[in-house]
Image: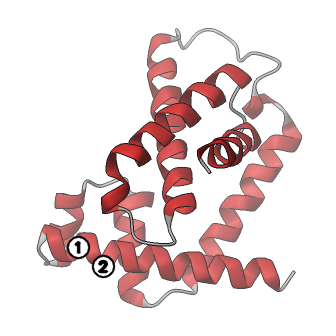
Amino acid sequence: MWGELFDEVYGYLRRLGASHFDAEEIAQDALEAAYLHVDGIAPGTLRAWLKVVARNKLVDRARRAARSVPTAEPPDPGDWDADPMNHALKRAQAERIRKAIDALGQRDRELIELRYLEERTLAETAGAVGASVANTKVALYRARQRLRHVLERMEGSR
């Protein structure tokens, strides 16, 4: 089972543009996190949980790398973002996600926008909506579930 999950997470990271080395390392880290926290993962959500963890680790790695690279350096020609096709694909994916968010109810939309689009902390999000951190965490989990369902319906209607 773990080997199959590794292959799935590795493939997901490669599709996101991670190098072979980064994808292997991040997939291994994500599986380790899942193994350590398996009791806290809702039944039936392990694959999605792993992908979120892997994506977050990839983003963290990219942020650290961006801070360590001088800004005057031109982008690498082989860079994912430098390729116009990849840029167009990312824009199309962002538009698809934006449409899915817009299809959510007002409360779910507000939570998703505050937490993920505005990149607020959980505590800041809770303060903005006037709820406790615990209630906000649960509400965000449910909002993400509904967002996933909307995205799946959109994918199925293509």
Q: At x 16% / y 71%, what residue is drawn?
A: 134
Task: Tell me the amino acid under the disc marked 1.
Answer: Thr
Residue 60 falls in which quadrant of the image? top left
Q: Is residue 94 left or right of residue 140?
A: right
Residue 75 at what x, y percent from top left? 71, 18
Residue 77 image point, x, y percent: 82, 18
Disc 2 residue type?
Answer: Ala
When asked about the image quadrant of residue 112, the answer is bottom left
Mark 1 residue element: helix
Residue 9 to residue 145: above or below: above
Residue at x 14%, y 78% (from the top left corner): 131
Q: Nearer the viewer, residue 145 or 101?
A: 145
Q: Are marks 2 and 1 in contact (CB under 8 Å)?
A: yes
Q: How far is disc 2 from disc 1 in space, using C-alphas?
A: 5 Å
Q: Position of residue 125 (x, y in %)?
A: 24, 65
Disc 1 target residue: 136
Q: Secondary structure at mark 2?
A: helix
Along the line of sight, the residue nearer the viewer: 79 or 140: 140
Label ID, residue 139: 2
- Mark drawn on residue 122: none
54 horizontally vs 20: left or right: left
